[in-house]
Amino acid sequence: MNILMMTNTYTPHVGGVARSVESFTNEYRKRGHRVLVVAPEFEDMPKKETDVIRLRAIQHFNGSDFSVALPIPGSLSAAIEKFKPDIVHSHHPFLIGATAVRVAYTHQLPLVFTHHTMYEQYTHYVPGDSPALKRFVIRLSTSYANLCDQVFAPSESVSAVLHKRGVTAPIDVVPTGVDVEQYSSGNGVEFRRRLKIPEQALVIGHLGRLAPEKNLEFLAGAVAEFMKAQTQAHFVVVGVGPSQQEMQRIFGQQGVSDRLHFIGILQYLELADALHAMDVFVFASMSETQGMVLTEAMSAGLPVIAVDAPGVREVVIDNKNGRLLYSEDHAQFVSALNWFSALPVDQLRQLKQAALATAQSFSIGHTAEKALQIYKRLIDQEFIDRDEEYNVWTSMHGLIRFEWEMLKGVAGAAGAALNVYEQDNKPVR
C-alpha cells in the first residue's frame, strides 16, 4: 500500500515523534510498502532522501529546538497526486496536521492520527502561555482526533485520557516499537575508554531531548546528590537541548561536574555503544505518552529507574526490570540508586533479563504489524464524511489562526479568543 506520513518533526530532529515516524517508515518499507513523508526542513538534514518532501520552516521556534513549517506550497498537491496514497497518517493536530485533514478529505482517504503528545504540557514554547491556552489545545487536539477514522494511542494511559476527554473516534494502542537488534550489542568498554571512565565505575545513563518538559532539573538534582556520596559513579547524558546549562549548574553546585558527560546526539552504532557503557538508565519526565527511550535502553539490557507517569508505567515494572517510583521525591530517587548500586550479581542479572524480555514485547515488528492490519481494515471501508466534526474543528482553528498567528507570536489576539473559551466552556480534564 502507499502510506502518506505527515509530521511536524522528522530526522535529524531528536525527539520521540521524529523517531517514531522514522521507525515505522523504515519497517513499512522493509515489508514492501511505499511511504511518502511530508515534514519541515531541519538544519543538517540529509542532502539526499527518498520519498521525503521537505517544506520550508522556521528553525528553533520561540527558543525551542523545534522546526515549524510555513504555509504549504502548491507543489505539494502535485507530489501527492503523483504518489497516489491509500491512507493518510497524521502525527500532529496543528500545522502539517491541518494539511493532512485537507488531503484526506480532498482525496476521500482514511485519516489516522497518532496522539503522540500531551500538548498542554508544551505550551511554554508559545507566547501567551496560560491555563486558558492549555485548555484550548486540549479541545483542539480532541476535536482533531474526532475528525479521524482511527486514533493510535502510544499507551494505555493515553488511551484512557483520550476517552475521558471525549474522543469518540476508534482508539487502538499502538506504541512505537523498538529495533531490538539495533541495541542488542555494543562496545561499551571502548565507549567508556574514550570518556576516560574507569571500567569498574557505576555509570548512570540518560537519553533524550534536554528540554524543560523532561523534568531534568529534578533528575539532575537527584543523580548529583547520589554521586556526591558515591564517588565511583559517573553520569552519561546522550542528547542536546536548552536544559543542558541548568544541569551543568546543578552538578557544579554538588562538586561532581568532573563526572558528568554530555555526549550530544548519537545515532545507530554509537548510540548502541553508549547504552552498553551504562549500568542503569534514569528517567523523570512526566510529559511522555510512551516509554520509547525506556524500551530502547532495555534493548541493551539496562534496568530503568523512573518516576511513575503515563507511558512509563506500561514499561517499568517495579522490582522486576527496574524501579518505578510513585512520587517525585529526591530522597526516594537517591534511595533507588543506592539500592541498585548494592545489588548482588544474581539479582542484577535477573533485572537485566527482565529488561530484555520487556524490550522484546515492544519490538517494531509487533507494533508495525498491528498498525498495518488497521490500515488495511480502514482502506476496505467506505469513506465517511464527517462534515459536522470538520466544521467544529475548523471554527476552533480559525479563532486564532493557530497555524500562523501562533508562530508570529501574536499573543494578544490569541488571548482574546481564549478568554471567550474560558468564560463559555468548562475546563477539560
Image (spheres, rainbow, N blue to C red):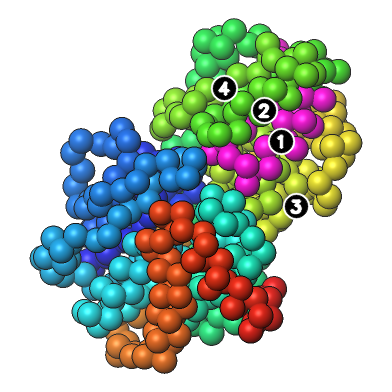
Using the image, determine if residue 297 lies above or below residue 151.
Answer: above
Which amino acid, by three-letter code, is at mark 3? Asp
Residue 302 screen position, x and y as percent: 64, 35
Mark 4, residue position:
262
Which amino acid, by three-letter code, is at mark 2? Met
Camera-near label (4 vs 2) is 2
What is the C-alpha distance between the residues marked 1 and 4? 15 Å
Between disc 3 and disc 2, whose residue precedes?
A: 2
Which amino acid, by three-letter code, is at mark 4? Phe
Magenta segment: 200-225
Between disc 1 and disc 4, whose residue precedes?
A: 1
What is the C-alpha distance between the residues marked 3 and 1? 17 Å
Residue 60 screen position, x and y as percent: 42, 41
Front-most of residues 183 and 381 = 381
Mark 1, residue position:
217
Mark 2, residue position:
247
Residue 153 screen position, x and y as percent: 53, 67
Of the 4 image quadrants, the one containing the N terminus is bottom left
What is the C-alpha distance between the residues marked 4 and 2? 10 Å
